[in-house]
Image (spheres, helix red, strand yellow):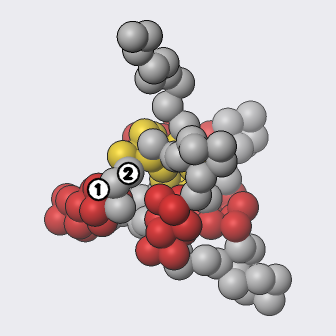
Amino acid sequence: MAERNNWPKLHNAMWPGVVGEGGDAEPPIALNTLLDLTAAARVDGEKFDGVDLFLAEPHTSIDSTDDQIRSLADLVSSKGLKIGSLVAAVWPPVGGGSALGSAEERKLFVTMVEKA
């Protein structure tokens, strides 16, 4: 019997700016709601294997403590999902800076990558 191809893994990118701009635009979707929707999603029997998390508020602070990260990992795992990657908050609206910008912008960019 042929084995089912286990690659590539399918992850949902959990970026607050993609799913809700916040402020006066549209409210961000709560992380728990995004995880529930991701875990329940099915297309032709296929489902998401995990999530990629954007390290920015309102979901996940780039300055999270080890205990907060453990709690986040437990939450994601409780939904039957894995964390595939963490995305550094390199964009200026979330505290980062341009990699091609001024010296100060580049410093902010590198700082966010180092934190992630």
Above or below, comparing residue 115 to residue 3 in the picture: below
**Residue lying farthest to the bottom in this orientation:** 24
Q: From the viewer's perspective, is 108 left or right of 85?
A: right
Q: Residues within 10 Å of mark 2 (few under 14, many from 20)?
A: many
Name the mark on residue 90: none
Q: Quadrant of the N terminus?
A: top left
Towards the viewer: 23 or 80: 80
Residue 85 is situated, as x and y percent measured from the top left of the image, at: 45, 40
Identify the residue at image location x=67%, y=53%.
91
Identify the residue at image location x=42%, y=66%.
61
Towards the viewer: 1 or 24: 1
Q: Residues within 10 Å of mark 1 (few under 14, many from 20)?
A: some
Q: Which residue is mark 2?
A: 81
Residue 35 is situated, as x and y percent measured from the top left of the image, at: 47, 65
Above or below, comparing residue 95 to residue 21 in the picture: above
Residue 62 is situated, as x and y percent measured from the top left of the image, at: 42, 59
Residue 89 is situated, as x and y percent measured from the top left of the image, at: 56, 53
Whether residue 4 is visible, yes or no, is yes
Do tag 2 and tag 1 residues touch (Cβ < 8 Å)? yes
Above or below, comparing residue 37 to residue 115 in the picture: below
Towards the viewer: 24 or 10: 10
**Residue lying farthest to the right in this orientation:** 25
The residue under label 1 is which amino acid type?
Answer: Ser
The residue under label 2 is which amino acid type?
Answer: Leu
Q: Which residue is mark 1?
A: 77
Q: Quadrant of residue 100?
A: top right
Q: From the viewer's perspective, is 12 left or right of 20?
A: left
How far separated are the C-alphas under marks 2 and 1?
5 Å
Whether residue 86 is visible, yes or no, is no
